[in-house]
Image (cartoon, rainbow, N blue to C red):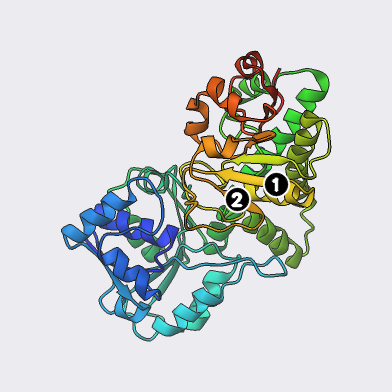
Amino acid sequence: MSNVAVIGAGYVGLTTAACLAHIGHNVICADIDEDKIFQLNDGKIPIHEARLSELVTEGLSNQQLKFVVGAQSAITTSDFVFLCLPTPQGEDGRADIGSVLEVVEEICHLVPPETIIINKSTVPVGTNTSIERTIQREDVYVVSNPEFLREGVAVTDFLQPDRIVIGATSSQASARVAELYDPIDAPIIAVDPASAETIKYATNSFLATKVSFVNGLAAVCEAVGADIESVTRGLGTDQRIGSRFLQPGPGWGGSCFPKDMQALVRIATDAGYEFDLLRAVIEANDQQFDRIVSKAELLLGEDLDGKNLTLLGLTFKAHTDDLRNSPALEVAKRLATQGANLTAYDPMVDSQTETLDDIRLVANIEQALDDSEMALILTEWPEFTRANWSKLIDLMDTPCLVDARNVLDRRSMIELGYRYDDLGRI
């Protein structure tokens, strides 16, 4: 059992703190947001994440988890300090590590000797070295330990990961961090810090590339009369490729992919290499948003100006409440530019409290479809798959539906009387 401080109570920090307490460590999680800390100590979770509320309640109950205001309150008895801080994208595409270095400067003279500072934030290559220079203590170690958490299943990803990456210059520090994860059954990838930092960017960039590839492939299928589901089934059984991330959609987004793609392009450029492949992937993703809008125009058969359109799903993926860089909102922005009147429903977006530009939010799917001239499914919520579309058709002014997630049965929807389009299916 170790004493662990986690600095930052966002998605990554809160999941890290709750899961480390769950596997037996004493954890103090710190944040500068006093209201958030008050709510967390009361067992109230500010984000929607499966199992996280239960683990926080468990940790509070057995006193292995507590929340405090400010980093200094968390680190005085720590064996390990996890940095789980935001690294937003700057105007030049680089990740801004200002918050990370600010906290490091705050705690560097206060942490006990032999403390290991573990960076979980997604940071440019070389940040570990920058942290070491800031600390300037030979009795404190800095280790890179990138996170690979998917929103909606973050707890599962932490407790049952594909691998645990540890980047360190000290084999002793690397071994101590590996020991911290002993209760978790996963391979340890021990590398140097620069490689660990690169692995994080490489992972997200490759996955985004895979998504853009299948979106382009769906367009090819439509052009040549092939079926994208049959094609991806053939692709996915090839062990060199695999079946995951081969589902077409309105484009990729979220809190990680866009900024990590841009950051890796910037890292490469700064190092003297023009990563044109990733630039093309970013451009292809932007084109995908426009492609969904074009599908809406073609299906309706007329200009979208003044038309009443329904958006089903706003979060960047199902099973999360996160709207950051959502493909649905990117499509909505383009539809609004065309003059469409937008009404939206999402199970995790509160129509009573949330306000979104150019979008009228409603509380259920029936309200969203009332007098609608077209609906677009933009997030793969199971609720939309289970909906009674045979009854919902009567609510619509014109039964047009663009299924940008391929969650409905094409033949059934057409038989019900919908003018229906999806991505690459026949």
Q: Position of residue 55 (x, y in %)?
A: 27, 52
Report the front residue among 158 and 195.
158
Residue 87's image quarter? bottom right
Query: Position of 381 compared to 373: left or right?
Result: left
Q: The disc labelled 2 sits on which kind of residue?
A: Arg
Report the front residue among 32 and 388.
388
Residue at point 59%, 24% (across, down): 394
Residue 381 visible at all: yes
Residue topped by disc 2: 360
**Which of the image's four quarters has the C terminus?**
top right
Residue at point 56%, 26% (across, down): 392
Q: Position of residue 338 (x, y in %)?
A: 79, 48
Question: Which residue occupies the extreme left position in the image?
Answer: 62
Instruction: Kindly identify which numbered label has been placed on residue 203.
Output: none
Query: Position of 177 compared to 369: left or right?
Result: left
Q: Earlier in the sequence, mark 2 or mark 1?
A: 1
Residue 110's image quarter? bottom left
Residue topped by disc 1: 341
Residue at point 71%, 35% (across, down): 215
Q: Is residue 162 above or below residue 66?
A: above
